Image: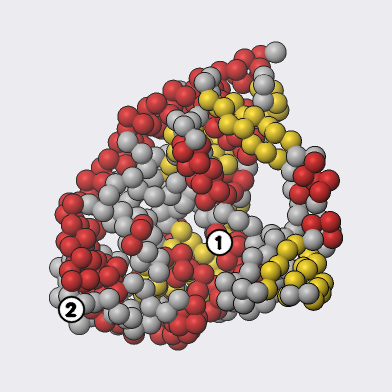
Amino acid sequence: MANALQNAAISTITFGDHYSVSRCFFPSLSTLPFRLPRFSSAIPLQHHFTVKGNHVELNKRVVLIKARNKSDFDEVEVDVSLSHRVNAVKPSKTMAISDHAAALLQAGVPVIRLAAGEPDFDTPTVIAEASFAGMNAIRDGHTRYTPNVGTLELRQAICHKLRVCFMTVSVEENGITYTPDEILVSNGAKQSVVQAVLAVCSPGDEVIIPGPFYVSYPEMARLADANPVIIPTHISNNFLLDPKLLEANLTERSRLLILCSPCNPTGSVYSKKLLEEIAQIVEKHPRLLVLSDEIYEHIIYSPATHTSFASLTGMWDRTLTVNGFSKTFAMTGWRLGYIAGPKHFVAACGKIQSQFTSGASSISQKAGVAALGLGYAGGEAVSNMVKAFRERRDFLVESFSKMDGVKISEPQGAFYLFIDFSSYYGREAEGFGLIENSDSLCRYLLEKGLVALVPGSAFGDDSCIRISYAESLTVLKTAVERIKKALIPLSSAALL
């Protein structure tokens, strides 16, 4: 440890033309497999603990602690190993990049952040009803635990949104019928997804995931001791799953197929016809279930339309539908999602939730009821947000389509552009080095262009980079100019 500290190096990274940040690196500690332990304040004050730094061995998950209690000294060997589940899971690159960009902003570097999967809109003012509902919930004393499964009021509202048989519905939003006991409300759609994976997958099962994929899907499978099986899609086919390729990859271990439409990171939308072809394949495999992640369902651009997989013939019993409030209603901070499906599966998810977090926030659930009360597709507030997203999408598609060596699949939903920049790989950038892949290109664009993007490697496709257009059109125009300017030296390098 002492040698490592002596070998610490100061590295200064320059961002753009005028900004630099100094960072301290410890080469010998870069692979240190543990963090130094902290001790609870519950330990009696007369006990003092110090870490014997010279006894820490970099290749072991054990540290020696010297405990001093009056005049007695004892060395205790502490095992700080982590579980195999944690060691198998990778941290989220999107979160890491967003946090890094935020840190640069705090350091005074004017970075444009196009990495976040979060609408830049506040919870719409018409959904002020949702905000007021939250405040009223506090005022009216709705601050206690709710049932683990969620309040009956919210679950009924969700059933209404999905189309229930015992309420009058003028418009069928999803065309699927559920009762409240077939709904589980969670702390965000992400929790709903991972609980579903844990509920239906056993060790060695296969989770089928079309790639590019949402970064957390494979890691959720690993948390369940299941094996993620990635089926690649291609930009030439708008990143849509080929049914023939799906069928060729199914085995007796295949347990869960995860579909996300509209898709993060590509913005692709599955047509009803394509989903019906997939459903025909699912029908042949009685052990195979489908998790349909529909969190972006209303951020969709005409003429594309959304189809809920559970609404297809024979698929209701095979499908777990996940949705939430974060994207459609710009309510990311409210942390509210839900899963709908056959009671047998939903009850299993509820059992897991009861031991993890219990029910979602009572205040958020009141706001959720108010949001769903806005009517079909969130009403005018949501349609105005989608209109703004479409304008931004059109601007970015037009701007990048004019660039040489760039391939684009025009997104039909969500608020991401997944662009193929692989023609820039293998080029040298002066003062930076070789652009080897999407990771190094994103680092380059951050350092030289001051734009934070997410490498396609995070989503299983290293040829691309994800650009979030959850920013104002003015900011996006500045970002495009920065990216173009930063890429000019790479374009020149290709001519050498």
The answer to whether one can see residue 90 in this image is: yes
Q: Residues within 10 Å of mark 1 (few under 14, many from 20)?
A: some
Left or right of 47 on screen, residue 55 = right
Q: Nearer the viewer, mark 1 or mark 2?
A: 1
Residue 60 location (% of width, % of height): 82, 63
| Residue at position x 84%, y 60% in the image | 55
User: Relative to residue 347, is residue 438 depicted above or below?
Assistant: above
| Residue at position x 75%, y 58% in the image | 33
How many numbered circles does the render carry?
A: 2
Residue 273 location (% of width, % of height): 41, 58
Residue 9 location (% of width, % of height): 74, 36
Left or right of 479 on screen, residue 449 = right
Q: Residue furthest front?
A: 71
Going by the numbered disc 1, the residue's amino acid type is: Tyr
- Report which residue position mark 1 lands on: 217
- Report which residue position mark 2 lands on: 167
Going by the numbered disc 2, the residue's amino acid type is: Met
